[in-house]
Image (tube, grey):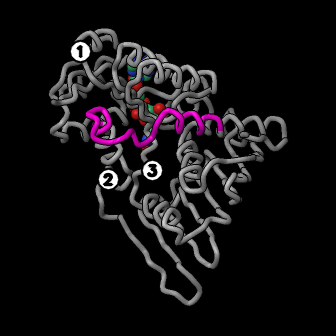
Amino acid sequence: MSVRVGLIGAGHMGRTHGMILAQDKRVEIRGVVDVQKERADALASALNARSYPTLDDLLSEGIDALYVATPNTRHLEPVVTALGAGVNVFSEKPMATSLAEATLILDAVKKANRVYQVGLNRRFAPVYKYARELISSGKITPYSAHIKMNRGELKTPPWVSDTSVTGGFLYESTFHLLDMCRFLMGEVDVVECVGRSNVYNELDNFAMVLRFKQGAIACLTSCAHSTWAFPFERVEIFGNHCQVVTEEMERVAYSSGLGQPIVVHDYFQLPVQEKWGYVEEDRLFIGAVLGENAPPVNAEDGYRTVQLVEACYESARSSRPVSLA
Ligand SMILES: NC(=O)c1ccc[n+]([C@@H]2O[C@H](COP(=O)([O-])OP(=O)(O)OC[C@H]3O[C@@H](n4cnc5c(N)ncnc54)[C@H](O)[C@@H]3O)[C@@H](O)[C@H]2O)c1
């Protein structure tokens, strides 16, 4: 059986997923929708699929799975509509841009009893899989972490500086690293966050202290007005005289102890779609639709990371620590 897939949002991520899915023999790409018809037409043509004017038109064609790659605040409507029609959904991050909307999606997933996966691709990037393996195998017990996620700018695509479309800067790339904190160190207990507005017309500079239920503590800084100087994303985790450090999704270094050699894995030469985890997340989503594997990132994960973003904003607004209990 092949999985009949539709895509909504024919921009950067719609194209990224479309081109990966086109290589998967288990997939038949049926159609593409975008509010900009020429974008839907161009991607449909590249994928040997049809362009549809609306999501309802695409759904009435009969699809098994929908990829949602519209901007952040435009996820809710297609996700809930597709689930309501009994269609499995892959949604780009973030799941939603408020807890109320994330709850609507959680409820829709439960009611539909379909696969729902959030595009938290970094969980499948080799650098982060390696770090997680070091932790789950007991080679490192995280006591402390130092994390940064900067953006060079909020200019491309143009909607990323419009909070009515992004939901706020923390729902942009920082969302991935807040999720990565949970992936590597477990659930957050308390967050203290300071936010500033320096360059853009919103809070664009954050310093956070995260306390985790399992005991680790972490500092995370994230600003929207850096440059793209490498590495704009970096995670350093420290244990008992051991550490693991990532640089982007290019390189990871594991120092196992005092006086020991440092093991480095360098993924520079891998295609971006593999080293950023997109190929594996798409393969596992299609596998989950076919019942071959469990959905690897479920609605609960999406919800909890939205909860963490909201806690950061609340702490920044109130100048108080916020508990996620
Ligand atoms: N996982 C990642 O690494 C990653 C990277 C970049 C972006 N993203 C996420 O992917 C999503 C899309 O980002 P992008 O960079 O592809 O943006 P983009 O601007 O390149 O593409 C978005 C597309 O959606 C279309 N669109 C907007 N509103 C629509 C609607 N209501 N119905 C149908 N089409 C609509 C636009 O015309 C555009 O073609 C965002 O949620 C973003 O946060 C994830």
Magenta range: 286-307
Asked which secondary structure carries label 3, the reply is helix
On the image, numbered disc 1 is attached to which residue?
A: 62
Q: How many numbered callouts? A: 3
**Residue situated furthest bottom in the rendering:** 259
Q: Is residue 317 visible?
A: yes
Task: Indicate left or right for 276 with 246 as reference.
Answer: left
On the image, numbered disc 3 is attached to which residue?
A: 123
Q: Quadrant of the N terminus?
A: top left
Q: Please state the horizontal and vertical placement of residue 175, each as a whole percent of the image.
A: 56, 42
The first of marks 3 and 2 along the sequence is 3
Q: Residue at x 64, y 50 (%)?
A: 222
Q: Residue at x 48, y 86 (%)?
A: 261
Q: What is the three-letter code of the residue carrying label 3? A: Arg
Separation of residues labelled 2 and 1 (CA atoms):
30 Å
Q: Quadrant of ligand 1?
A: top left
The first of marks 2 and 1 along the sequence is 1
From the image, state whether disc 2 or disc 1 is nearer to you.
1
Separation of residues labelled 3 and 2 (CA atoms):
12 Å
Asked which secondary structure carries label 1, the reply is loop
Q: Is residue 152 visible?
A: no
On the image, numbered disc 2 is attached to which residue?
A: 274
Callout 3 touching callout 2 (CB < 8 Å): no
Q: Are there few (<14), some (14-19), or many (20+) residues within 10 Å of tag 3?
A: many
Q: Residue at x 36, y 13 (%)?
A: 85
